[in-house]
Amino acid sequence: MGNTESAVVQKRLTRFRPEERPAIDGVFNKLVCGGGGSEAAGNAITLQMLQSSMGSVASDSLVRRVFRCLCSIDPDLAAPAFGKADQRPASLVTREQLVIFLADTLRGTAEERAPLVLVMSQPPSSAAAAVTCGQVVEFVQDLISAVVQILTSRGRLDGWKPDKMADSSVGVKLLAENLCSELKPADPDSCDVSCLEDWIFRTPQVSLYLEMLADEGLSVSLSSCPPPRLLPPCRETPWNELDSLLDVPTLMFLAPQVPDGYSAPWRLAFSTQVHGESFTRMMASLTRGGPSLLLLKDTKGHVFGGFASHTWELKPQFQGDSRCFLFSVVPTMRVYTATGYNEHFMYLNQHQQTMPNGLGMGGQHEYFGLWLDSDFGRGHSRARPKCTTYSSPQLSGDEDFTLDSMEVWHVGKPPKAEEEE
Protein backbone atom coordinates (compact mmCIF):
# COMPACT_ATOMS: atom_id res chain seq x y z
CA MET A 1 0.00 0.00 0.00
CA GLY A 2 1.13 3.52 -0.70
CA ASN A 3 2.75 5.93 1.75
CA THR A 4 -0.01 8.51 1.17
CA GLU A 5 -2.52 6.55 3.20
CA SER A 6 -3.73 8.05 6.45
CA ALA A 7 -2.32 6.98 9.79
CA VAL A 8 -5.76 5.63 10.65
CA VAL A 9 -5.65 3.21 7.71
CA GLN A 10 -2.10 2.15 8.52
CA LYS A 11 -3.18 1.46 12.09
CA ARG A 12 -6.10 -0.63 10.86
CA LEU A 13 -3.71 -2.75 8.80
CA THR A 14 -1.71 -3.69 11.89
CA ARG A 15 -4.63 -5.86 12.99
CA PHE A 16 -3.67 -8.31 10.27
CA ARG A 17 -0.58 -10.48 10.35
CA PRO A 18 2.17 -9.55 7.87
CA GLU A 19 1.35 -12.61 5.78
CA GLU A 20 -2.33 -11.60 5.69
CA ARG A 21 -1.86 -8.04 4.50
CA PRO A 22 -1.26 -8.91 0.82
CA ALA A 23 -4.66 -10.64 0.82
CA ILE A 24 -6.31 -7.50 2.24
CA ASP A 25 -4.51 -5.32 -0.29
CA GLY A 26 -5.45 -7.71 -3.08
CA VAL A 27 -9.18 -7.41 -2.45
CA PHE A 28 -9.24 -3.92 -3.96
CA ASN A 29 -7.35 -5.04 -7.06
CA LYS A 30 -9.63 -8.05 -7.56
CA LEU A 31 -12.75 -5.94 -7.27
CA VAL A 32 -11.53 -3.29 -9.72
CA CYS A 33 -10.11 -5.80 -12.18
CA GLY A 34 -13.10 -8.13 -12.03
CA GLY A 35 -11.34 -10.75 -9.93
CA GLY A 36 -8.17 -10.95 -11.99
CA GLY A 37 -5.94 -10.03 -9.08
CA SER A 38 -3.57 -7.94 -11.28
CA GLU A 39 -2.66 -4.29 -10.72
CA ALA A 40 -5.81 -2.17 -10.38
CA ALA A 41 -7.03 -0.62 -13.61
CA GLY A 42 -8.58 2.28 -11.72
CA ASN A 43 -8.58 3.95 -8.34
CA ALA A 44 -12.13 3.28 -7.14
CA ILE A 45 -14.78 0.57 -6.78
CA THR A 46 -18.22 0.96 -8.33
CA LEU A 47 -21.49 -0.63 -7.33
CA GLN A 48 -21.32 -2.85 -10.39
CA MET A 49 -17.91 -4.17 -9.34
CA LEU A 50 -19.22 -4.96 -5.87
CA GLN A 51 -22.27 -6.71 -7.33
CA SER A 52 -19.99 -8.83 -9.50
CA SER A 53 -18.07 -10.03 -6.43
CA MET A 54 -20.88 -10.41 -3.88
CA GLY A 55 -23.85 -11.22 -6.10
CA SER A 56 -23.42 -14.99 -5.82
CA VAL A 57 -23.92 -14.99 -2.05
CA ALA A 58 -25.77 -11.76 -1.23
CA SER A 59 -29.04 -10.27 -2.41
CA ASP A 60 -28.98 -7.07 -4.44
CA SER A 61 -30.47 -5.33 -1.41
CA LEU A 62 -27.58 -6.40 0.81
CA VAL A 63 -24.93 -5.53 -1.80
CA ARG A 64 -26.37 -2.02 -2.01
CA ARG A 65 -26.35 -1.77 1.78
CA VAL A 66 -22.65 -2.69 1.85
CA PHE A 67 -21.87 -0.25 -0.95
CA ARG A 68 -23.62 2.62 0.83
CA CYS A 69 -21.67 1.74 3.97
CA LEU A 70 -18.35 1.75 2.08
CA CYS A 71 -19.15 5.11 0.50
CA SER A 72 -20.02 6.62 3.88
CA ILE A 73 -16.67 5.87 5.53
CA ASP A 74 -14.52 8.93 6.15
CA PRO A 75 -10.85 7.74 6.03
CA ASP A 76 -9.83 10.55 8.38
CA LEU A 77 -12.43 9.50 10.95
CA ALA A 78 -12.24 5.78 10.13
CA ALA A 79 -16.03 5.69 10.54
CA PRO A 80 -19.18 6.57 8.62
CA ALA A 81 -19.74 10.33 8.33
CA PHE A 82 -23.28 10.74 9.59
CA GLY A 83 -25.17 13.74 8.32
CA LYS A 84 -22.79 14.29 5.38
CA ALA A 85 -24.64 12.48 2.63
CA ASP A 86 -24.30 15.48 0.31
CA GLN A 87 -20.50 15.61 0.83
CA ARG A 88 -19.51 11.99 0.32
CA PRO A 89 -19.16 10.29 -3.09
CA ALA A 90 -22.31 8.45 -4.08
CA SER A 91 -20.86 6.01 -6.58
CA LEU A 92 -17.17 5.35 -5.82
CA VAL A 93 -15.27 3.54 -3.05
CA THR A 94 -11.57 4.18 -2.45
CA ARG A 95 -8.94 1.73 -1.34
CA GLU A 96 -8.76 3.36 2.08
CA GLN A 97 -12.50 3.04 2.62
CA LEU A 98 -12.36 -0.65 1.72
CA VAL A 99 -9.44 -1.33 4.09
CA ILE A 100 -11.26 0.32 7.00
CA PHE A 101 -14.41 -1.67 6.23
CA LEU A 102 -12.50 -4.97 6.11
CA ALA A 103 -10.53 -4.23 9.27
CA ASP A 104 -13.65 -3.32 11.23
CA THR A 105 -15.81 -6.22 9.99
CA LEU A 106 -13.11 -8.89 10.24
CA ARG A 107 -11.11 -7.69 13.28
CA GLY A 108 -13.09 -4.81 14.74
CA THR A 109 -14.76 -4.20 18.09
CA ALA A 110 -18.47 -3.75 18.77
CA GLU A 111 -17.80 -0.01 18.97
CA GLU A 112 -16.33 -0.03 15.45
CA ARG A 113 -18.92 -2.33 13.93
CA ALA A 114 -21.95 -0.47 15.30
CA PRO A 115 -21.67 2.54 12.90
CA LEU A 116 -21.33 0.15 9.97
CA VAL A 117 -24.46 -1.74 10.99
CA LEU A 118 -26.33 1.54 11.42
CA VAL A 119 -25.50 2.68 7.88
CA MET A 120 -26.33 -0.74 6.40
CA SER A 121 -29.68 -0.63 8.20
CA GLN A 122 -30.58 2.80 6.81
CA PRO A 123 -32.91 3.15 3.83
CA PRO A 124 -31.32 4.57 0.65
CA SER A 125 -30.39 8.27 0.69
CA SER A 126 -30.66 8.46 4.49
CA ALA A 127 -27.83 9.75 6.68
CA ALA A 128 -29.65 9.86 10.00
CA ALA A 129 -27.84 9.08 13.23
CA ALA A 130 -30.45 6.50 14.24
CA VAL A 131 -32.60 3.80 12.65
CA THR A 132 -35.75 1.99 13.69
CA CYS A 133 -35.72 -1.52 15.11
CA GLY A 134 -37.69 -2.65 12.07
CA GLN A 135 -34.95 -1.37 9.75
CA VAL A 136 -32.33 -3.30 11.73
CA VAL A 137 -34.49 -6.44 11.43
CA GLU A 138 -34.63 -6.01 7.63
CA PHE A 139 -30.84 -5.70 7.45
CA VAL A 140 -30.34 -8.75 9.65
CA GLN A 141 -32.72 -10.74 7.43
CA ASP A 142 -30.56 -9.87 4.42
CA LEU A 143 -27.44 -10.81 6.38
CA ILE A 144 -28.78 -14.20 7.52
CA SER A 145 -29.98 -14.98 3.99
CA ALA A 146 -26.43 -14.36 2.76
CA VAL A 147 -24.99 -16.67 5.42
CA VAL A 148 -27.42 -19.44 4.42
CA GLN A 149 -26.42 -18.94 0.78
CA ILE A 150 -22.73 -19.08 1.71
CA LEU A 151 -23.22 -22.36 3.58
CA THR A 152 -25.12 -23.79 0.61
CA SER A 153 -22.98 -22.55 -2.27
CA ARG A 154 -19.65 -23.22 -0.54
CA GLY A 155 -20.50 -26.83 0.33
CA ARG A 156 -20.60 -26.34 4.11
CA LEU A 157 -23.91 -28.07 4.83
CA ASP A 158 -22.10 -31.13 6.22
CA GLY A 159 -24.78 -33.66 5.37
CA TRP A 160 -27.89 -31.44 5.63
CA LYS A 161 -30.26 -31.29 2.64
CA PRO A 162 -32.10 -27.94 2.37
CA ASP A 163 -34.35 -29.30 -0.38
CA LYS A 164 -35.61 -31.93 2.11
CA MET A 165 -36.03 -29.45 4.96
CA ALA A 166 -38.48 -26.69 5.88
CA ASP A 167 -38.54 -23.36 4.02
CA SER A 168 -35.44 -21.36 4.99
CA SER A 169 -37.10 -18.05 4.13
CA VAL A 170 -39.41 -18.50 7.12
CA GLY A 171 -36.49 -19.44 9.37
CA VAL A 172 -34.54 -16.37 8.21
CA LYS A 173 -37.30 -14.04 9.43
CA LEU A 174 -37.68 -15.90 12.72
CA LEU A 175 -33.94 -15.92 13.43
CA ALA A 176 -33.65 -12.22 12.58
CA GLU A 177 -36.49 -11.44 14.97
CA ASN A 178 -34.80 -13.53 17.65
CA LEU A 179 -31.48 -11.73 17.31
CA CYS A 180 -33.10 -8.29 17.17
CA SER A 181 -35.24 -9.02 20.22
CA GLU A 182 -32.04 -8.27 22.17
CA LEU A 183 -32.04 -4.64 20.99
CA LYS A 184 -32.57 -2.28 23.92
CA PRO A 185 -33.10 1.21 22.50
CA ALA A 186 -33.25 4.13 24.92
CA ASP A 187 -36.04 5.65 22.85
CA PRO A 188 -38.78 3.28 21.69
CA ASP A 189 -38.04 1.95 18.22
CA SER A 190 -35.05 4.26 17.65
CA CYS A 191 -31.61 2.63 17.62
CA ASP A 192 -28.57 4.88 17.69
CA VAL A 193 -24.90 3.85 17.60
CA SER A 194 -24.65 3.23 21.34
CA CYS A 195 -27.72 0.97 21.26
CA LEU A 196 -26.27 -1.02 18.35
CA GLU A 197 -22.87 -1.24 20.04
CA ASP A 198 -24.43 -2.74 23.16
CA TRP A 199 -26.47 -5.16 21.02
CA ILE A 200 -23.50 -6.33 18.94
CA PHE A 201 -21.46 -6.84 22.12
CA ARG A 202 -24.20 -9.06 23.61
CA THR A 203 -25.14 -10.84 20.37
CA PRO A 204 -21.98 -12.45 18.94
CA GLN A 205 -23.82 -13.96 15.96
CA VAL A 206 -24.04 -10.50 14.38
CA SER A 207 -20.26 -10.12 14.31
CA LEU A 208 -19.82 -13.69 13.09
CA TYR A 209 -22.26 -13.18 10.20
CA LEU A 210 -20.62 -9.88 9.26
CA GLU A 211 -17.22 -11.58 9.17
CA MET A 212 -18.58 -14.32 6.91
CA LEU A 213 -20.12 -11.77 4.56
CA ALA A 214 -16.90 -9.79 4.25
CA ASP A 215 -14.69 -12.87 3.97
CA GLU A 216 -16.80 -14.80 1.46
CA GLY A 217 -18.51 -11.97 -0.40
CA LEU A 218 -15.25 -10.12 -1.02
CA SER A 219 -13.09 -13.26 -1.35
CA VAL A 220 -10.62 -12.19 1.33
CA SER A 221 -9.43 -15.75 2.03
CA LEU A 222 -7.24 -15.28 5.09
CA SER A 223 -5.50 -18.64 5.39
CA SER A 224 -4.97 -18.20 9.13
CA CYS A 225 -8.74 -18.14 9.72
CA PRO A 226 -10.57 -21.41 8.97
CA PRO A 227 -14.24 -20.99 8.03
CA PRO A 228 -16.49 -20.88 11.09
CA ARG A 229 -18.76 -23.86 11.65
CA LEU A 230 -22.40 -22.87 11.96
CA LEU A 231 -24.03 -26.28 11.50
CA PRO A 232 -23.42 -29.59 13.26
CA PRO A 233 -22.69 -32.56 10.98
CA CYS A 234 -25.72 -34.64 10.00
CA ARG A 235 -25.32 -38.41 9.82
CA GLU A 236 -27.47 -41.54 9.54
CA THR A 237 -30.52 -39.70 8.22
CA PRO A 238 -32.80 -41.21 5.50
CA TRP A 239 -33.27 -38.07 3.44
CA ASN A 240 -35.02 -39.99 0.67
CA GLU A 241 -37.90 -40.62 3.12
CA LEU A 242 -37.80 -37.42 5.18
CA ASP A 243 -39.09 -33.86 4.83
CA SER A 244 -37.69 -32.42 8.04
CA LEU A 245 -39.29 -29.85 10.32
CA LEU A 246 -35.84 -28.24 10.61
CA ASP A 247 -34.47 -25.60 8.27
CA VAL A 248 -30.96 -24.15 8.05
CA PRO A 249 -31.63 -20.96 10.11
CA THR A 250 -33.34 -23.06 12.80
CA LEU A 251 -30.22 -25.23 12.97
CA MET A 252 -28.12 -22.08 13.27
CA PHE A 253 -30.35 -21.11 16.20
CA LEU A 254 -30.46 -24.47 18.00
CA ALA A 255 -26.94 -25.84 17.53
CA PRO A 256 -25.16 -23.33 19.84
CA GLN A 257 -27.64 -24.15 22.63
CA VAL A 258 -26.68 -27.84 22.72
CA PRO A 259 -23.72 -28.70 25.01
CA ASP A 260 -21.74 -30.51 22.30
CA GLY A 261 -22.54 -27.68 19.91
CA TYR A 262 -21.15 -28.25 16.47
CA SER A 263 -18.85 -31.19 17.21
CA ALA A 264 -21.19 -34.15 17.73
CA PRO A 265 -23.22 -35.30 14.71
CA TRP A 266 -27.00 -35.03 14.67
CA ARG A 267 -28.68 -38.33 13.78
CA LEU A 268 -32.37 -38.82 13.07
CA ALA A 269 -33.71 -41.30 15.63
CA PHE A 270 -37.45 -40.98 15.04
CA SER A 271 -39.86 -39.24 12.70
CA THR A 272 -43.62 -39.65 12.42
CA GLN A 273 -43.19 -39.29 8.66
CA VAL A 274 -40.66 -42.13 8.47
CA HIS A 275 -41.63 -44.39 11.39
CA GLY A 276 -45.32 -43.67 11.87
CA GLU A 277 -47.25 -42.38 14.88
CA SER A 278 -46.05 -44.84 17.50
CA PHE A 279 -45.24 -43.88 21.08
CA THR A 280 -43.53 -47.24 21.60
CA ARG A 281 -41.32 -46.73 18.57
CA MET A 282 -40.50 -43.17 19.66
CA MET A 283 -39.75 -44.34 23.21
CA ALA A 284 -37.35 -46.98 21.89
CA SER A 285 -35.41 -44.26 20.07
CA LEU A 286 -35.19 -42.16 23.24
CA THR A 287 -33.95 -44.90 25.56
CA ARG A 288 -30.74 -45.35 23.58
CA GLY A 289 -28.32 -43.06 21.82
CA GLY A 290 -27.51 -40.37 24.37
CA PRO A 291 -28.69 -36.72 24.41
CA SER A 292 -31.65 -35.93 22.20
CA LEU A 293 -33.61 -33.05 20.80
CA LEU A 294 -37.38 -33.36 20.39
CA LEU A 295 -39.10 -31.26 17.73
CA LEU A 296 -42.91 -31.12 17.57
CA LYS A 297 -45.40 -29.39 15.30
CA ASP A 298 -49.03 -29.07 16.34
CA THR A 299 -52.07 -28.70 14.09
CA LYS A 300 -52.08 -24.93 14.72
CA GLY A 301 -48.65 -24.64 13.06
CA HIS A 302 -46.62 -24.01 16.21
CA VAL A 303 -43.19 -25.68 16.23
CA PHE A 304 -41.48 -26.29 19.57
CA GLY A 305 -39.59 -28.90 21.57
CA GLY A 306 -37.01 -29.72 24.18
CA PHE A 307 -33.44 -30.87 24.69
CA ALA A 308 -32.71 -33.85 26.94
CA SER A 309 -29.16 -33.88 28.26
CA HIS A 310 -28.81 -37.66 28.47
CA THR A 311 -30.51 -40.91 27.45
CA TRP A 312 -34.12 -41.15 28.63
CA GLU A 313 -35.03 -43.80 31.19
CA LEU A 314 -38.47 -45.41 31.41
CA LYS A 315 -39.51 -44.85 35.04
CA PRO A 316 -42.18 -42.96 37.03
CA GLN A 317 -39.70 -40.44 38.44
CA PHE A 318 -38.26 -37.21 37.10
CA GLN A 319 -34.77 -37.34 35.62
CA GLY A 320 -32.27 -35.15 33.80
CA ASP A 321 -30.23 -32.13 34.86
CA SER A 322 -30.03 -28.38 34.44
CA ARG A 323 -28.57 -28.64 30.94
CA CYS A 324 -32.03 -29.58 29.66
CA PHE A 325 -34.15 -26.83 28.11
CA LEU A 326 -37.37 -26.14 26.24
CA PHE A 327 -37.57 -24.03 23.10
CA SER A 328 -39.95 -22.61 20.53
CA VAL A 329 -39.31 -22.12 16.81
CA VAL A 330 -42.66 -20.97 15.39
CA PRO A 331 -44.10 -18.37 15.87
CA THR A 332 -40.98 -17.11 17.70
CA MET A 333 -37.49 -18.55 18.24
CA ARG A 334 -36.70 -18.68 21.95
CA VAL A 335 -34.82 -20.95 24.39
CA TYR A 336 -36.00 -21.48 27.97
CA THR A 337 -33.37 -22.79 30.37
CA ALA A 338 -33.65 -24.25 33.87
CA THR A 339 -34.69 -21.85 36.62
CA GLY A 340 -33.46 -23.92 39.58
CA TYR A 341 -36.97 -23.87 41.11
CA ASN A 342 -37.23 -27.67 40.86
CA GLU A 343 -35.58 -30.60 39.10
CA HIS A 344 -38.50 -31.76 36.96
CA PHE A 345 -36.40 -31.76 33.80
CA MET A 346 -37.49 -35.00 32.08
CA TYR A 347 -40.20 -37.62 32.61
CA LEU A 348 -40.94 -40.79 30.61
CA ASN A 349 -43.42 -43.44 31.70
CA GLN A 350 -45.72 -46.09 30.22
CA HIS A 351 -48.20 -48.76 31.39
CA GLN A 352 -48.69 -47.32 34.90
CA GLN A 353 -52.16 -47.08 36.41
CA THR A 354 -51.39 -44.53 39.14
CA MET A 355 -48.91 -42.25 37.35
CA PRO A 356 -49.13 -40.21 34.12
CA ASN A 357 -48.17 -42.20 31.05
CA GLY A 358 -46.26 -40.26 28.42
CA LEU A 359 -43.33 -37.91 27.96
CA GLY A 360 -42.98 -34.67 29.88
CA MET A 361 -40.51 -31.85 30.41
CA GLY A 362 -40.84 -29.21 33.11
CA GLY A 363 -43.65 -28.30 35.48
CA GLN A 364 -45.39 -31.11 37.34
CA HIS A 365 -47.73 -34.04 36.79
CA GLU A 366 -50.75 -33.04 34.69
CA TYR A 367 -49.24 -29.57 34.29
CA PHE A 368 -46.09 -29.99 32.18
CA GLY A 369 -44.29 -27.32 30.22
CA LEU A 370 -44.28 -29.90 27.41
CA TRP A 371 -46.28 -33.11 27.52
CA LEU A 372 -46.93 -35.83 24.94
CA ASP A 373 -49.45 -38.45 25.95
CA SER A 374 -48.68 -42.14 25.47
CA ASP A 375 -51.68 -42.18 23.11
CA PHE A 376 -49.25 -40.11 21.05
CA GLY A 377 -51.61 -37.86 19.11
CA ARG A 378 -52.37 -35.56 22.05
CA GLY A 379 -50.36 -33.38 24.38
CA HIS A 380 -50.34 -30.17 26.37
CA SER A 381 -48.19 -27.18 27.20
CA ARG A 382 -49.41 -25.60 30.41
CA ALA A 383 -47.84 -22.48 31.81
CA ARG A 384 -49.83 -19.98 33.85
CA PRO A 385 -48.02 -17.72 33.74
CA LYS A 386 -44.75 -19.66 33.21
CA CYS A 387 -43.48 -23.23 33.56
CA THR A 388 -41.81 -23.48 36.97
CA THR A 389 -38.87 -25.58 35.74
CA TYR A 390 -37.94 -23.62 32.61
CA SER A 391 -39.89 -20.34 32.88
CA SER A 392 -41.36 -21.09 29.46
CA PRO A 393 -44.74 -19.79 28.30
CA GLN A 394 -47.32 -21.95 26.53
CA LEU A 395 -45.43 -23.36 23.55
CA SER A 396 -48.33 -24.85 21.57
CA GLY A 397 -51.11 -23.04 19.76
CA ASP A 398 -53.68 -24.37 22.23
CA GLU A 399 -52.94 -25.46 25.78
CA ASP A 400 -54.16 -28.95 24.87
CA PHE A 401 -52.83 -29.59 21.40
CA THR A 402 -53.13 -32.19 18.67
CA LEU A 403 -49.83 -33.41 17.23
CA ASP A 404 -49.22 -32.90 13.52
CA SER A 405 -45.68 -34.33 13.26
CA MET A 406 -42.62 -34.98 15.37
CA GLU A 407 -38.90 -35.69 15.07
CA VAL A 408 -36.30 -36.95 17.54
CA TRP A 409 -32.65 -36.20 16.84
CA HIS A 410 -29.71 -37.65 18.77
CA VAL A 411 -27.46 -34.63 19.18
CA GLY A 412 -24.62 -35.77 21.38
CA LYS A 413 -21.97 -38.40 21.64
CA PRO A 414 -23.66 -41.76 22.26
CA PRO A 415 -22.74 -43.71 25.41
CA LYS A 416 -19.75 -45.98 24.85
CA ALA A 417 -21.58 -49.04 26.12
CA GLU A 418 -24.34 -48.49 23.60
CA GLU A 419 -21.79 -47.96 20.83
CA GLU A 420 -20.17 -51.30 21.64
CA GLU A 421 -23.55 -53.03 21.83
Image: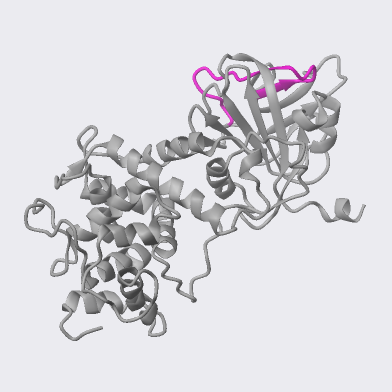
Of the pair 145 and 311, the residue shown nearer to us = 145
- Residue 398 found in image quarter: top right
- Residue 140 found in image quarter: top left
Q: Position of residue 57 (x, y in %)?
A: 45, 54
For this orientation, the residue located farthest to the right is 421
Tell me which residue sits at (24%, 33%) in the image.
Answer: 189
Residue 97's place in the image compared with 390, above or below, is below
Q: Position of residue 147 (x, y in %)?
A: 47, 52
Question: Is 50 situated left or right of 334 in this image?
Answer: left
Q: Main secondary structure of the magenta part?
A: loop
Magenta-tinted stretch: 369-389
Of the pair 342 and 89, the residue shown nearer to us = 89
Residue 369 seen: no
Of the pair 98 and 60, the residue shown nearer to us = 60
Q: Position of residue 336 (x, y in %)?
A: 53, 35
- Residue 184 found in image quarter: top left
Tell me which residue sits at (69%, 55%) in the image.
Answer: 264
Tell me which residue sits at (30%, 35%) in the image.
Answer: 134
